[in-house]
Amino acid sequence: MKSPPLLLTFCLFLVVGGIVAVRATESGSAPKAGEYVDLASIPFSVEPPQGPDASAGTFTVECGRNEKGHYNTDNVVTSPGLVGGAHHTHDYVGNVSTNALSTDRSLAAAGTTCEDGDRSAYYWPVLRRLDRAGTDADAHGGGRHGNAGEILRPSSVRVEYHGSPAGKVIPMPRFLRMITGDPQALTNGDGQVRAQWGCAGHPDRFAVEYPRCPAGLGPTRTLDFPSCWNGLHTDSEGHRAHVAFPGPDGACPPRTFAVPRLRITLTYDLPPSTPFAVDSFPRQKRHPKTDHAMFINVMTERRQARLVACLNEGRRCRPTP
C-alpha cells in the first residue's frame, strides 16, 4: 500500500488536531479569557458591624496542606455511597478516611491531620496549573472528564471559625453536614454561588472570576459556610435546607440559630500569568463560579464547647491537643 501524499497527511493532521481541540474546549479543560479579572478590578467586601452582643472571637485549627496526598473523586456529603460520583478530584484536610463510603462511625474512629485531634472532614475541588500535564490525564475525574493540568497543593490552608456579629453562637451538632457554593452553577444559575477568589495579601477583596495577581501574590480561595442551623437536623434533602447563611446585617433567619461560622482560606504560589483552573463537572467547563467546599463536623462535644466559649468570649484561640 502506498503512503498517502504529504498534503493529505497534513490535512488529516489538521482535522484530527481540530477535533481534539474542540473536544478539549467542550470538556472545559481551559477557562475563557473573560473568566479572569485583574486585582485592581476586584471589589472590597463589607462585613456587617459588630452588635453589642456579638460573639467576636476567632478559633483557628491547623490541619496541614494535605501533605499525604488524600485525593479522590467522591463526595460523601452530596453523594454518599457513590464511588467516583464527583467526576472531579477533591482535596482533603482533617479526617484521613473520608470517601464515598464513610459513615458517622467510621469518621469518628479515623485519624486526622488536625493538630488538636479534630476529626472533621474539610474538602474542596483541586486547583490545577494548566501549563503542566497532570498525572491523571487519562483518569476518571482528571483528564477523562476535562480536568487537565497538574494538581496544585496549596501553600497554606487556613481553617478558622468565627462568631456572629449579631449575638452569641451555640454548638454545632456532631456530624452536621454542609456544602457552600454550587458545583453546577454554570447551568443552575447564580442562586447558590459562593465563590470568593482573590489574591494573597488582600483578604477583603473577592470576585467570582479567577484573579490575575501581581508577582509574589498568588491566587486565593475563601470558602465561607452557612452559620445558621435549624436546631433539628444534621442533613436534609438537597443538603442545604437544614442550614442557612445570615442576612446582610449578620443576623440569622427566623427559626434558625447562630452556630460557629467556618471559613477556609486556600492560598497558592503561582507566577503571574500562569493559567490555572478549578476542577468541575464536565458541563460546568471549569467556570470559577462553580467553586465549592464540603464539611462534616466530627468534633467531640468537649472540643465544640471550647470553640463556642472562645467565640462568645471574644478571644482569639488556637486549640491545644
Image (cartoon, rainbow, N blue to C red):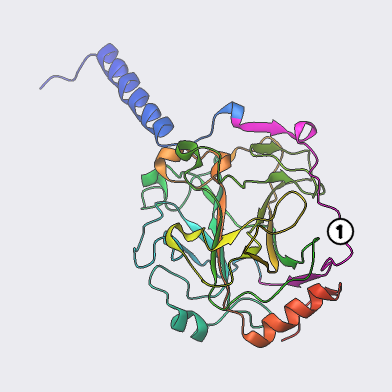
Total number of numbered discs in the rendering: 1
* Residue 317 appears anywhere in the view: no
Q: Relative to residue 159, is residue 167 drawn left or right? A: right
Residue at (40%, 67%) from the top-left corner? 100
In this orientation, which residue lies closer to the viewer: 305 or 80?
305
Q: Residue at x 64, y 37 (%)?
A: 209
Q: Is residue 102 visible?
A: yes
Nearest the eye: 280 or 140: 280
From what the image shows, is residue 93 above or below residue 173? above
Label 1 CA crowd tier, 10 Å (few <14, some 14–19, many 20+): some
In which image quadrant can residue 35 be found?
top right
Q: Quadrant of the C terminus?
A: bottom right
56 falls in the magenta region? yes
- Which residue appears farthest toward the right when viewing the image? 52
In the picture of the structure, the residue carrying the numbered disc 1 is 50
Whether 238 is drawn above or below 194: the answer is below
Quadrant in which the N terminus appears? top left
Residue at screen point 41% across, 55% down: 86
Q: Nearer the viewer, residue 275 or 119?
A: 119
Residue 160 position by quadrant:
bottom right
**Magenta stretch in the rendered image:** 35-63
Q: Position of residue 75 (x, y in %)?
A: 44, 61
At x 35%, y 30%, the residue is 20
For residue 305, above or below residue 204: below
Q: Main secondary structure of the magenta part?
A: loop
For the residue marked with disc 1, what is the amino acid?
A: Gln
Return the x and y of residue 143 as percentages of the image width and height.
40, 45
Where is residue 230 shown, x and y percent of the image?
A: 58, 67
Residue 316: within the magenta? no
Say which element carries label 1. Answer: loop
* Residue 259 in the image, given as x and y percentages of width and height: 68, 69
